Amino acid sequence: MTTLLLFGAGLVAGTLNVIAGGGSLLTLPLMIFMGLPAGVANGTNRVALLVQNVAAVWSYHGHGAMDWKWLPQAALPGLLGAVVGTGFALRIDDLAFERVLAIVLVLVALWTIWDPLGKREVGDTIVGVDGFGRRIAVAGAFFLIGVYGGFVQAGVGFIILALTTSLGLNLVRGNALKVLFVLSYTPLSLALFAWDGKVNWAYGVALAFGNLAGALIGVRLAVLRGHTWVRRVVMITVIAFAIRLWVWG
């Protein structure tokens, strides 16, 4: 029953993650409610994210939506940031992490209500990052996103999409860069969690199979339909999880 529940959660989360984001906002609280310590749930979630993003990158590349030229501009600062963020995550106690996660859930719910990316249409012009000052600013932004992703990961997709949209990428290519960016730091983050003994591999593998299937579904939906309808589902779900985690966490 546990395996089936984790697979189902992973299926939904993988689909959400590659369409817009927010999948970890479902899987992290679920694993905590199932009895995993918050730190272990945070580390275990990385197993599924690794598998999901490998599949998503491959699938986006197959659809011709992957802009590989962005990798060096995003991956290196993001990787350094993820090391810092993961270090914070390994040192925070479980109760404090649950409180942080509850706040993140509320903030992401407010983000989905605001929906600042809702009017961005697929097919907008893609621009580069010109000028030394702007390159430094973009690298700094990816570093900070890496810190956040290494620390909690939940909701990081929305932050990345906000950045990629400001850089001129449409939502499909922004999603493609998002999964590539997350994949660039997830193996190291997972290794650090595993080294510290904060990965439940049985839960992680069950979740990963679901995320794998969800990622393949999500890429197709992202290319064909976009993600406005997904935001409504995420909004309702994360509000419910936030209340549950804050009151009974």
Image (tube, rainbow, N blue to C red):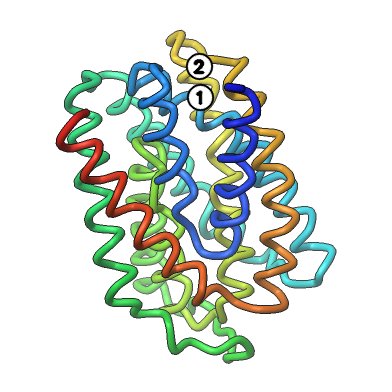
Q: Percent position (x, y) of residue 34?
A: 42, 22
Q: Percent position (x, y) of residue 15?
A: 62, 55
Is residue 72 visible in this depiction of the protein? no
Q: Secondary structure at mark 1?
A: helix
Image-quadrant location for residue 57:
bottom right
Residue positioned 37% across, 29% down in the render: 86
State which quarter of the image contains the N terminus. top right
| Picture layout, residue 102 above or below residue 60 | above
Q: Which numbered disc, 2 or 1, marks the residue that appears first in the sequence?
A: 1
| Picture layout, residue 165 above or below residue 124 | above
Image-quadrant location for residue 137:
bottom left
Image-quadrant location for residue 123:
bottom right
Look at label 2 and name its amino acid: Val
Look at mark 1 in the image and give the residue it sits on.
Answer: 44
Look at label 1 and name its amino acid: Thr
Tags 2 and 1 in contact by the CB under 8 Å rule?
yes
Which of these two is toward me, 246 or 38?
246
Label 1: how many residues lie within 10 Å, few (<14), some (14-19) or many (20+)?
many
Q: Which mark is residue 199?
A: 2
Q: Percent position (x, y) of residue 178?
A: 55, 59
Residue positioned 55% across, 57% down in the render: 16
Which of these two is toward me, 226 or 158?
226
Tag count: 2
As measured in the structure, the alpha-carbon distance from the residue carrying label 2 to the one carrying label 1 is 5 Å
